[in-house]
Amino acid sequence: MMVSYGTLSVTNVYANEAEQTQRLSQQLSKTNAQEVVQLAQTLGIKTDSEEIIITDSQMVRLLEKSGVDTSQIMLPRRDGVTKIISRGRGSWDVYISATWIQNYYWVLGAAAGVIAAIAPGIGWGLVYSIVASVAGLVGQNSKNGVIVRVRNWEISSMSYQ
């Protein structure tokens, strides 16, 4: 099945990747979201803002706190950035770091739980849909991050940064 979002085509995630993502997501759901928010604030992430910025190294720390094994993650010298910008009334722009797309797609499901915990109102289901769609880009060897635009609680478009 092929789904088209704006300038980007996304295919379904392979079964083994989906299975691994589901396992990581279930592991994360056992973690108290408030603990993740508290750690995010300790790391300097403003969780009460309309623009939430998370560096790749901060995301790794949040995933560790959530019980995800991050021992295989080797961060590059330069941190990428994931941003969630609230546009109000069920609308967000989510910028997902190219580093995550290229190297860490297998923890995107767990990252969805982290993002849902620290970005008020967006909800786990919507964030999971966003990261599952982005995980389909792995085979396209993206050198850029992805912008996912959500309008009225639905993905309206995706494009490279």
Image: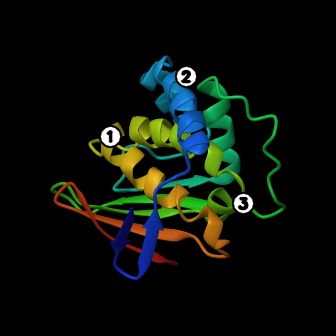
Question: At 46% across and 51% down in the image, what residue appears?
Answer: 132
Circle 1: element type: helix
**N-terminal-most mark, 1 or 3:** 3
**N-terminal-most mark, 2 or 3:** 2
Disc sitting over residue 93 in the figure: none
**Relative vertical location of residue 43 with respect to residue 50 in this rendering, above or below:** above
Image coordinates for residue 160, horizontal then vertical, percent: 51, 78
User: Which is nearer the eye, 98 or 38?
Assistant: 98
What separation in Å lies between label 2 and label 3 (alpha carbons)? 25 Å
Q: Which quarter of the figure has residue 69?
A: top right
Closer to viewer: mark 1 or mark 3: 1
Which residue position holds label 3?
Answer: 79
User: In the figure, is residue 4 to the left or right of 146?
Assistant: left
Which residue position holds label 2?
Answer: 27
**N-terminal-most mark, 1 or 2:** 2
User: Which is nearer the eye, 49 or 115?
Assistant: 115
Q: Amino acid at mark 2?
A: Gln
Q: Amino acid at mark 1?
A: Gly
Question: At 55% across and 38% down in the image, what residue appears?
Answer: 21
User: Which is nearer the eye, 59 or 29?
Assistant: 29
Which residue position holds label 1?
Answer: 125
